[in-house]
Image (cartoon, rainbow, N blue to C red):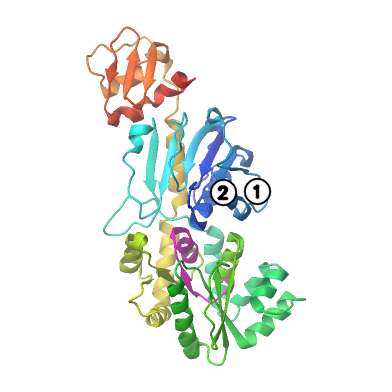
Amino acid sequence: MAANISLSDRIGNKSILVSSEGSGGGRGDLMCTYKVAQLLADQGGVPESQIICQMREGDINQFPIEGRKFVIQSFAKEIPTTNIALHILAPGDVPSYKAPAPILLLREYNFPPQNFLSERYAFIREHALGLNEERQEGFQGIFVDRELFQWSQTEEAKDPEKRIFQLELLSESRLAEILGQDVTSKRVALEEFQRENVLFFGYASKQETREKFVEAIISYSATHHPGKKVTVLFAGANHRNQPSTDAKVISLDLTPTEMRTLFRGAQRECLVTGDQTISEAISAGMLPIYERLDYKSDLAEALEANFGLMAYKSYRNMAAILEHLHADKDQIDHTSRKICLEQDATTNVLHLATEALESQREVPRDLCDQVVTAESLPLDQLACITTDQICQLDISSRTLAIKGFPQWKFQSSMIDLTHYLIRKVKA
């Protein structure tokens, strides 16, 4: 577990803004926003009322608030930037304003650094979420779901006959949709279902991938669950399910909390896609098949080459992948546990947030009488210029005017150092 790092003293009565992508963001972006907010509150010591979670209007109802007191706002509502101590994009587009607060951008595994950011914003820290592996380093880890991970280490999690009873955490109406029958007693209904049925769970982007998963699960179950009927549940109500005489296929629009419950209650062999969903599957000790999308190819290759987690593309035999997962489940369990213990992003993200806030400290007053006399502005002298000496600071044109001196032109590499000055100038 990460050590507690209090950020509340650093932000005073201001807020931390956490945004997911404003255009086209998926469920993973929404969950990333929630996990960052949860981290700031639970381990960073930030009051929930001082954490603003910003997202698309249509995503608000899907946000897993779960009794939290975060401030939930849509992109349509303007947030006063003077009340923001730190802006975390997790992950997402850069803001349209030139922020007076530092920005911490958490990129997903596959997305390259956005070098243009330092040209537009005064102080920004840019880091990538993802798993360190042999070819590349510098990733901050994944958001490990500690509750799922702790449960995955229990005997119950490894017992295929007992997992189904985790679905008692679902509402009666949702459980009835999955089981296809009225539910008066959850325990009785699950006992009856388990005697004759086996449940698998999947979440994928492409219709072809879902269909191949159903075919492979039918074949796999004939060997490993003989005599039982197969039910395959997909997250996403808009999916078209091909009729099958050998399996019952359901698609439901599940909330993030319900999906986490399915990772506990369905069989361990599952289908996932995206950064956040594979993170939850690893946390839950699942045996995941990762849907390999073209723009996620680097992550898929890293999972397969370095962690033994198999990716699926159309030319792959998914039934063979399932058999591989079954045969190597002990090694995959070892790898998943190692990832959860050694590559948890929470500690790193808290330190990055702290560093970004520390960049906003006032210039020490004992430097006020020092002046800059060189014709070019040295990097080590910028902190010696006081706010009283500033006439103009224009980030877009990289111009800094100082009383008694000509205008200074500075390079983009110096932009980060202007965090000593910009708040007074903007005010």
**The residue under label 2 is which amino acid type?**
Gln
Residue 124 is situated, as x and y percent measured from the top left of the image, at: 39, 36
Q: Residues within 10 Å of mark 2 (few under 14, many from 20)?
A: some
**Mark carried by residue 327:** none
Q: Is residue 150 visible?
A: yes
Q: Residue at x 38, y 11 (%)?
A: 389
Q: Is residue 208 left or right of residue 239?
A: left
Q: Is residue 364 left or right of residue 165?
A: left
Residue 147 is situated, as x and y percent measured from the top left of the image, at: 56, 60
Marks 2 and 1: in contact by CB < 8 Å? Answer: yes
Q: Is residue 281 magenta?
A: yes
**The residue under label 1 is which amino acid type?**
Arg
Q: Residue at x 58, y 69 (%)?
A: 262
Q: Is residue 6 visible?
A: no
Q: Residues within 10 Å of mark 1 (few under 14, many from 20)?
A: few
Question: Considering depth in this image, is 326 or 335 the residue closer to the camera?
Answer: 326
Question: Considering depth in this image, is 246 or 322 the residue closer to the camera?
Answer: 246
Q: Which residue is mark 1?
A: 68
Which element type, helix, strand or loop, lies under badge 2? helix
Above or below 324: residue 291: above
Residue 206 is situated, as x and y percent measured from the top left of the image, at: 44, 69
Q: Which residues are magenta?
A: 264-282
Above or below 109: residue 322: below
Residue 400 lies in what quarter of the image? top left
Q: Residue at x 46, y 85 (%)?
A: 220
Q: Residue furthest left?
A: 375
Q: Is residue 120 magenta?
A: no
Q: Which residue is mark 2?
A: 38
Residue 378 lies in what quarter of the image? top left
Q: CA distance from mark 1 to mark 2?
A: 9 Å
